[in-house]
Image (spheres, rainbow, N blue to C red):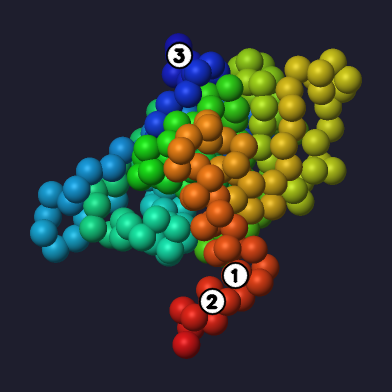
Amino acid sequence: KAYDVYYNKGSAIGRVNGLAVLAEGSAGLVLPIEAEIAPAASKEEGKLIATGKLGEIAKEAVQNVSALIKKLSGKDISKLDLHIQFLQTYHGVEGDSASISVATAVISALERIPVKQSLAMTGSLSVRGEVLPVGGVTEKVRAAIKAGFKEVIIPYANKQDVVLNKEELKKIKIIPVRTLHDVLKHAFEKHKRKKKLLATLEKIIAPNGLKLYLAKTLT
């Protein structure tokens, strides 16, 4: 028997409720993710340790977001040991849609800002911090409702893909997002560092800010 290992109340640092679907079926499920950060044990470089069947996806998500994190916090995560754990994985879970969850967990652990546990999320993340569409959105939102979550973050591009009845819609608030800035704005609890972090992130991934940032990094 599989036991549920997610929380749907309170807040936690480095812990995010992701959502996924089974590749061979259509059932949605909650995919809790935890990130822990420590100074690198090796003097040369830090290690990225990702456990669970989705380890490779976690590594890719972290690589995608590492440049953003460095710009955002001034912290080079290659000099830290980063441990990411998928707490409840099943055979056949597709996981590219876990990348905003991984990024949120990592930034929460780095900045020590708690994440709302009454909220779940799904979305893929580009290296620019844009939230990209994913599959199985209706199934994922249904899984969030069944698990008792109050809010769910989905990619803005998937807004029209959610097909729920009136009773289901009453049970959850759906939050469509375009960028990682939007994700953290809704997912993070109130915190003294949140405002500054969001202001910095907005400069990096706002259309003009992104062009300036890329121009600086490419020249």
Residues tagged 1 and 2 counted as in contact (Cβ below 8 A): yes
In the structure shown, which secondary structural element does the residue marked by tag 1 occupy?
helix
Disc 3 is placed on an element classified as: loop
Mark 1–mark 3 Cα distance, whole angstroms, equals: 42 Å
Category of crowding for the residue at label 1, using alpha-carbon neighbours closer than 10 angstroms: few (below 14), some (14–19), many (at least 20): some
Front-most of residues 200 and 128: 200
The residue that mark 1 highlights is: 210
Instruction: Estimate the x, y position of residue 83 in percent, counting from the top left.
Output: 30, 42
Q: Nearer the viewer, mark 1 or mark 3?
A: 1
- Quadrant in which the N terminus is drawn: top left
The picture quadrant where one finds residue 112 is top left
- Residue 110 image point, x, y percent: 35, 45
As measured in the structure, the alpha-carbon distance from the residue carrying label 1 to the one carrying label 2 is 6 Å
Residue furthest to the front in view is: 192
CB atoms at circles 1 and 3 under 8 Å apart? Answer: no
The residue furthest bottom is: 219
Q: What residue sits right under mark 3 in the picture? A: 3
Q: Nearer the viewer, residue 68 or 113?
A: 113
Residue 195 lies left or right of residue 168; in this view the side is: left
- Name the quadrant containing residue 27: top right
Q: Which residue is mark 2?
A: 214
- The residue at the point 55 percent across, 64 percent down is 204
How far is the residue under mark 2 from the one under mark 3?
45 Å
